[in-house]
Image: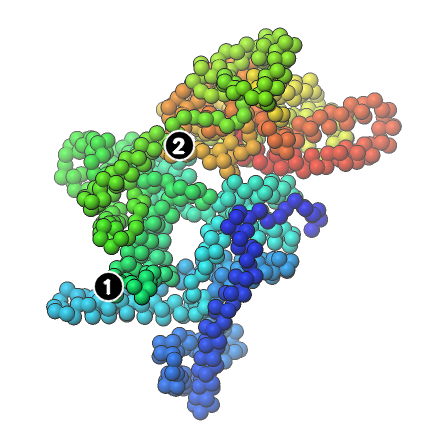
């Protein structure tokens, strides 16, 4: 592989707790070995004694009586054992049987059943190999630790399902037996269930693998730290695709990790790494479905939205059930012993253990509703999905088929959570009236799985609140829908106060005041300080030398400011371009723009009712280059059929407009730091002929440019795939001879429109890219809407390298134009080499920019 070293790639800087784990790694590893060594010694001695018994019986019996030999060995083993029960010997019966199978069929290539090893020990060993720079061994062990942990959970789940019927005979006697026998039958049921689970798990998990892991190991895996090690390990092994995947997987759960973000950007620029390689290996299906459903809903694709919401509800129920099962079959700490002065007897300890189990089950609601990398869960996660599903079903069923039975069932399911919700009850009455009040419609019941979920959860809550009131147990209810009658009277006052506080935060979106931390100051009061005074003095000098006041360009006027736009750091400037300049760029777009450019080749990335064309500055330069420039480039491009159809002055104007907009906005928003162009994209969106009737979607759904907006929680998360480096956004309009296509701003709910801007030639809209400015574009229902979209950043690292490459091409063409034809041929190679030497890094960064920005356009 001809891959140059990338010295900047390294494991992410650990946080305080992870650092503590690193510092004590050797001590923890040695301690772990000391803990498991006695068990290993006992197991090894036991297995040796058992194997000796098997060998003895095999030498005195024929091959046809192998099973009898094993049985005889088993009983011999059991009789000789003084410290192990017959059950423990049974745990090794499968090992012996597999050994006999291999001996009997050595020529057939049968494989010995491999028991799962402790994944924490595999992880310790992998980290040790990592620090020893044994990269191949480290990758193998780290991957095996991840796979073993997943396999362990699957094995426990399978055993839980296999042992469902264990002890049912004894359990059924609880209703028929009288007197003092009920407790014995209950213990019989518990013991049979425990015996079944232990034996079942023992068939696939080694005894050491069944031991509980430390809280440090749980923390390492919960924060996906194995992938932190893996991304460097795979880089060292020159497996860049796997390195990119591991880095992305870690970053999803650690979105504020700047070093990993930088590593990902470096991987993007490396040859052989594609955008599809950045996938989340730990992606949770219910969140994938949730995001897909929200996207379909935003584009008014109600049929697909209903399907995704239904799948999301089912997957959420399954994930919750899976989490609850792990509470039962995973090692659980016994109730704390209060010492010699403790007064807890067997029943008190049994109650404490059962309450811990129930609390673990209830906490699954929070676990499933928390996205990777987030601290808090999404409140009312399952009821919210049912609300969305109900709306989507009504939209597609009522409008397309006239059958609302599915929507009615979903509405009834939602009413199980909130039986007195006024809007839902009104909707229910509407359905009855629409359906004529027939008995069939009134007989539609909630979904069985939802009813079962509610009933089980309510019973668990009743037991837990009893423990809180009478057994000094601590429990935090994860649900807002819990009915008041479940809570004991003595706890209701505090419970009501806490619930009211949560509801108020949700109603207000937990955002009492929009605060823009972008560092821009349009329309803001600046608190006097030394640094601000220096800034104001320097800005005052700018006003003295500029004829346009805050806008240093003649003819440019402020059409709308923060007050007119009802927001923060928003502005509309008119007169930025002349009519002639608009016509030149429109002609350039007509000749050179290509369908799907900037959208990964998708002609209709946001809506099927419009087609999108795009053009960047660099591509315009390459398309419009003359023969001399083509020779300087030294690469093969797709050229227009007629040379000179694209005027170089038009491409230079496209380039200059970016700098013009940067100067205007840098001055208006009074940015105290440098402002760099991050990306420039000429975009035209055209209404598709015959596709506009009855249209209800948007040309571009509401979004925020540098974070992922969640309208239902009013949160905006600065993490990929959002372009988190963007600080300022702008759109420069080129025409107005179309219908629709207005830019509009909303609140964080993505519904409440706060301002609208109608496009026109030379009109510039600028605004900070953060969560204070959610925005979208109304549908273009006739004609072709063209505009120049620009984004700016305060970080020089993320400046637009394509612009610099375009400038390098112009410089190379200008120098070669001064040479004679024969000298040009002789010097062409060295000139090209010189340009390449200057712009090699720029080209790599340019490829990266193409990859990143090619995913989606934001305006």
In this image, 426 relative to 853: left or right? Answer: left
The answer to whether residue 743 is visible is: yes
Which callout, 2 or 1, points to the residue nearer the camera? 1
Q: Residue at 25% of width from left, 41% of height from top?
A: 495
Residue bearing the label numbered 2: 714
**Left or right: 353, with 728 as reference point:** left
Q: Which label sits on residue 440?
A: none
C-alpha distance separating marks 2 and 1:
47 Å
Q: Residue at x 48, y 66 (%)?
A: 117
**Could you tell me residue 99's position as x and y percent?**
47, 78
Q: Residue furthest front?
A: 341
As drawn, 94 above or below 24: below
Residue 162 higher or lower than 231, as above or below: below
- Residue density around tag 1, few if under 14, some if 14–19, many if 20 or more, within 10 Å: few
Task: Rate crowding at label 2 as few (under 14), some (14 to 19) or many (20 or more) other CA atoms within 10 Å.
Answer: some
Secondary structure type for disc 2: loop
Q: Is residue 363 above or below residue 501?
A: below
Looking at the image, residue 680 lies above or below residue 226: above
Q: Position of residue 570 (x, y in %)?
A: 49, 19
Q: Nearer the viewer, residue 435 or 164?
A: 164
Image point (61%, 11%), residue name: 543
Residue 347's tag is 1
Residue at horizontal 31 percent and vertical 66 percent from the top: 340
User: For the residue labelled by badge 1, is the local secondary structure a helix, a strand or a loop?
Assistant: helix
Q: Nearer the viewer, residue 24 or 585?
A: 24
Pinpoint residue 855: horizontal percent, then vertical percent.
Answer: 54, 35
């Amino acid at each position: 592989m001809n891959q140059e070293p990338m010295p900047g790639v390294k494991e992410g800087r650990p946080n305080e707790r992870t650092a503590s784990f690193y510092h004590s790694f050797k001590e923890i590893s040695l301690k772990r070995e000391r803990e498991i060594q006695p068990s290993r010694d006992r197991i090894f001695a036991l297995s040796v004694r058992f194997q000796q018994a098997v060998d003895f019986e095999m030498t005195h019996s024929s091959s046809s009586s192998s099973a009898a030999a094993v049985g005889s060995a088993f009983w011999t083993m059991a009789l000789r054992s003084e410290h192990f029960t017959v059950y423990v010997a049974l745990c090794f019966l499968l090992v012996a049987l597999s050994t006999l199978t291999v001996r009997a069929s050595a020529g057939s290539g049968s494989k010995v059943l491999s028991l799962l090893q402790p994944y924490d020990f595999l992880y310790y060993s992998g980290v040790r190999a990592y620090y020893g720079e044994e990269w191949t061994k480290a990758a193998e062990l780290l991957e095996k630790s991840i796979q073993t942990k997943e396999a362990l959970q699957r094995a426990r789940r399978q055993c839980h399902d296999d042992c469902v019927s264990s002890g049912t005979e004894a359990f059924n006697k609880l209703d028929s037996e009288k007197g003092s026998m009920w407790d014995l039958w209950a213990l019989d049921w518990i013991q049979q269930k425990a015996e079944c689970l232990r034996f079942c798990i023992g068939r696939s998990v080694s005894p050491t693998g069944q031991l509980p892991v430390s809280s440090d190991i749980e923390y390492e895996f919960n924060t996906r730290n194995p992938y932190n090690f893996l991304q460097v390990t795979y880089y060292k092994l020159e497996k860049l695709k796997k390195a990119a995947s591991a880095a992305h997987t870690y970053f999803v759960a650690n979105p504020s990790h700047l070093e990993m973000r930088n590593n990902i950007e470096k991987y993007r620029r490396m040859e052989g790494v594609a955008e599809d390689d950045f996938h989340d290996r730990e992606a949770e299906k219910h969140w994938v479905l949730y995001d897909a459903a929200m996207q379909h809903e935003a584009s008014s694709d109600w049929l697909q939205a209903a399907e995704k919401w239904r799948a999301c509800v089912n997957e959420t129920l399954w994930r919750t059930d899976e989490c609850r099962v792990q509470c039962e079959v995973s090692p659980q700490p016994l109730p704390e012993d209060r010492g010699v002065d403790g007064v807890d007897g067997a029943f008190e300890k049994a109650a404490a253990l059962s309450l811990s189990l129930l609390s673990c089950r209830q906490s699954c609601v929070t676990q499933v509703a928390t996205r990777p990398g987030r601290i808090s869960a999404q409140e009312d996660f399952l009821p919210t999905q049912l609300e969305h599903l109900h709306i989507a079903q009504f939209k597609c069923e009522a409008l397309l088929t006239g059958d609302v039975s599915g929507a009615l069932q979903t509405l009834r399911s939602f009413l199980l959570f909130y039986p007195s919700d006024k809007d839902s009850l009104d909707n229910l009455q509407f359905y009855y009236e629409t359906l004529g009040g027939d008995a069939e419609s009134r007989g539609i019941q909630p979904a069985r799985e939802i009813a079962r979920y509610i009933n089980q959860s309510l019973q668990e809550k009743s037991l837990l609140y009893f423990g809180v009131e009478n057994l000094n147990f601590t429990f935090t209810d994860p649900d807002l829908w819990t009915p008041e009658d479940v809570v004991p009277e003595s706890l209701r006052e505090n419970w009501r106060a806490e619930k009211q506080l949560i509801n108020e935060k949700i109603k207000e979106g937990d955002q009492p005041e929009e605060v823009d931390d972008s560092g821009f100051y349009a329309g803001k009061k600046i608190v006097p300080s030394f640094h601000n005074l220096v800034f104001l003095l320097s800005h005052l000098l700018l006003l003295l030398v500029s004829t346009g006041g805050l806008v240093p360009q003649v003819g440019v006027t402020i059409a709308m400011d923060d007050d007119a736009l009802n927001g923060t750091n928003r502005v509309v400037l008119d007169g930025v371009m002349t009519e002639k300049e608009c016509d030149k760029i429109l002609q350039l777009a007509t000749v050179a723009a290509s369908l799907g450019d900037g959208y990964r080749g998708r002609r209709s990335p946001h809506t099927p009712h419009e087609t999108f064309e795009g053009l960047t500055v660099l591509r315009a330069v390459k398309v419009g280059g003359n023969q001399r420039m083509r020779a300087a480039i030294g690469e093969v491009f797709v050229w227009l059929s007629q040379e000179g159809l694209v005027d170089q002055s038009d491409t230079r104007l496209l380039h200059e407009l970016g700098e013009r907009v940067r100067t205007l906005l840098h001055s208006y928003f009074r940015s105290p730091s440098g402002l760099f162009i991050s990306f420039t994209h000429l975009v035209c969106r055209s209404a598709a002929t015959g596709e506009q009737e009855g249209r209800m979607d948007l040309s571009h759904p509401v979004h925020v440019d540098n974070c992922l907006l969640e309208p239902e929680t009013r949160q905006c998360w600065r993490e990929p795939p959002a372009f988190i480096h963007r600080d300022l956004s702008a759109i420069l309009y080129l025409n107005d001879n179309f219908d629709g296509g207005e830019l509009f701003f909303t609140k964080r709910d993505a519904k409440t429109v706060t301002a609208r801007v109608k496009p026109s030639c030379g009109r510039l809209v600028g605004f900070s890219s953060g969560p204070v400015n959610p925005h979208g574009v109304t549908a273009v229902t006739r004609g072709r809407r063209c505009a120049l979209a620009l984004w700016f950043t305060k970080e020089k690292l993320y400046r637009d390298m394509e612009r610099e490459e375009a400038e390098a091409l112009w410089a190379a063409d200008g120098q070669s134009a001064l040479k004679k034809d024969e000298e040009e041929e002789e010097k062409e190679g060295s000139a090209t080499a010189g340009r390449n030497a200057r712009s090699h890094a720029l080209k790599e960064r340019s490829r990266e920019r193409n990859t990143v920005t090619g995913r989606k356009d934001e305006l």
